[in-house]
């Protein structure tokens, strides 16, 4: 790694100045660049503690890195907490594992491996009755390939193998998400509770009190409404398509109204006839194709409006 030498040289210069000044300089240094942040966590214990939480604030689990997380979980397994003894390697691994889990605020699950391996790691290394292992994950983004993993049927739940049906149950207990983002919930037009990826998302968020759900690349005319979620946002793939609002799951209780924002749609064309009337009355619909008031998505930072002038 060529840049290590330069980084070390910079670090060796630092002890000449008081720590407050070092901290002031490093705060600026790490602010703009993720690799600088990684270097800063390696300087010493003080800076490690100062920047570690920042390092893991945004995490994307995917095939390339999920095994490293599983290994960390494995290493921390079977530790015995005894304050009278010097910390064992397992205890240090456990502390590190829990600290990484606690630091994550924005989590993205990118693909099948991220869901499957994460669920295995949690199932094997985290006690079932424990508090959520990711207590601070408030934003969860489900990538397109992760959604295709949920698409599988998994009829038989009594196999020992991990599958996306079991993974959803494990992930649901592992965090308490406030904002959920979904990339391409279905690749085909029909969407209902009969489709595995739809009922798995319903199950995933069942115990959370979601404040919003954002649907990126929402294919076809159906816009799914999830019970009890106060804000639904959709970025539809075809701007000229009429939107048809439909409940993701049959109505059981419906306590709060919901605001529905359909973005990237050109003419106002919304059909609420599939909703029970009392629910349709509690839903406010906004349809728009301008960026007014809509910044990037709070889950993933992507823009919801696909503008015609994007090419210039
Ligand atoms: Zn998003």
Image (spheres, grey):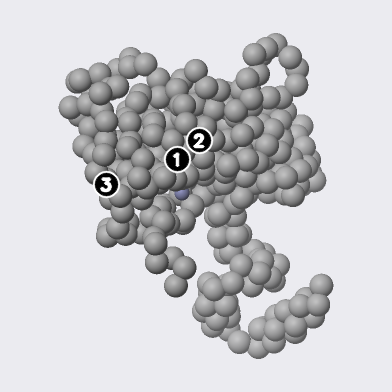
Q: Identify the residue under disc 3.
A: 267
User: Which SS class for mark 3?
Assistant: loop
User: Which SS class for mark 1?
Assistant: strand
Spatial distance from mark 1 to mark 2, Cα to Cα? 7 Å
Q: Identify the residue under disc 1.
A: 218
**In what quadrant of the picture does the C terminus appear?**
bottom left
Spatial distance from mark 2 to mark 3, Cα to Cα? 23 Å
- Name the residue located 51 percent from the left edge and 40 percent from the top edge: 184
* Label 3 CB-ligand 1 distance < 8 A: no
1 and 2 marks in contact (CB < 8 Å) = yes
2 and 3 marks in contact (CB < 8 Å) = no
In screen coordinates, is 306 left or right of 137?
left
10 Å crowding of disc 1: few (<14), some (14-19), many (20+): many
Q: Identify the residue under disc 2.
A: 185
* Label 2 CB-ligand 1 distance < 8 A: no
The dot on residue 19 is: none
User: Which SS class for mark 2?
Assistant: loop
Examine the rendered structure and indicate whether residue 58 appears above or below residue 255: below
Q: Nearer the viewer, mark 2 or mark 3?
A: 3
């Amino acid at each position: 790694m060529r840049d290590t030498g330069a980084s070390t040289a910079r670090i060796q210069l630092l002890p000449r100045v008081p720590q407050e000044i070092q901290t002031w300089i490093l705060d600026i240094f790490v602010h703009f660049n993720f690799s600088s942040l990684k270097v800063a966590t390696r300087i010493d214990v003080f800076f490690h503690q100062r920047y570690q939480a920042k390092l893991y604030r945004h995490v994307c689990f995917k095939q390339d890195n999920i095994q490293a997380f599983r290994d960390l979980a494995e290493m921390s397994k079977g530790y015995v907490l005894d304050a009278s003894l010097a910390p064992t390697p397992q205890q240090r691994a456990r502390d590190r594992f829990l600290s990484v889990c606690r630091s994550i605020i924005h989590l993205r699950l990118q693909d099948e491996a991220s869901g499957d391996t994460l669920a295995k790691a949690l199932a094997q290394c985290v006690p079932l009755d424990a508090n959520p292992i990711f207590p601070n994950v408030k934003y969860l983004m489900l990538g397109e390939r992760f959604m295709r993993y949920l698409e599988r049927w998994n009829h038989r739940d009594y196999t020992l193998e991990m599958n996306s049906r079991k993974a959803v149950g494990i992930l649901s207990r592992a965090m308490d998400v406030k904002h959920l983002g979904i990339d391409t919930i279905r690749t085909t037009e029909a969407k209902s509770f009969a489709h595995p990826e739809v009922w798995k998302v319903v199950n995933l968020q069942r115990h959370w009190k979601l404040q919003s759900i954002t649907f990126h690349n929402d294919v076809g005319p159906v816009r799914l409404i999830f019970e009890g979620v106060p804000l639904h946002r959709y970025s539809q793939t075809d701007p000229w398509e009429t939107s048809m609002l439909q409940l993701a799951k049959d109505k059981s209780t419906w306590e709060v109204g919901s605001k529905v924002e359909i973005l990237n749609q050109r003419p106002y064309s919304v059909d609420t006839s599939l909703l029970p009337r009392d629910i349709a009355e509690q839903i406010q619909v906004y349809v728009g194709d301008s960026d007014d008031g809509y910044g990037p998505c709070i889950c993933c930072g992507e823009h919801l409006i696909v503008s015609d002038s994007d090419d210039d």
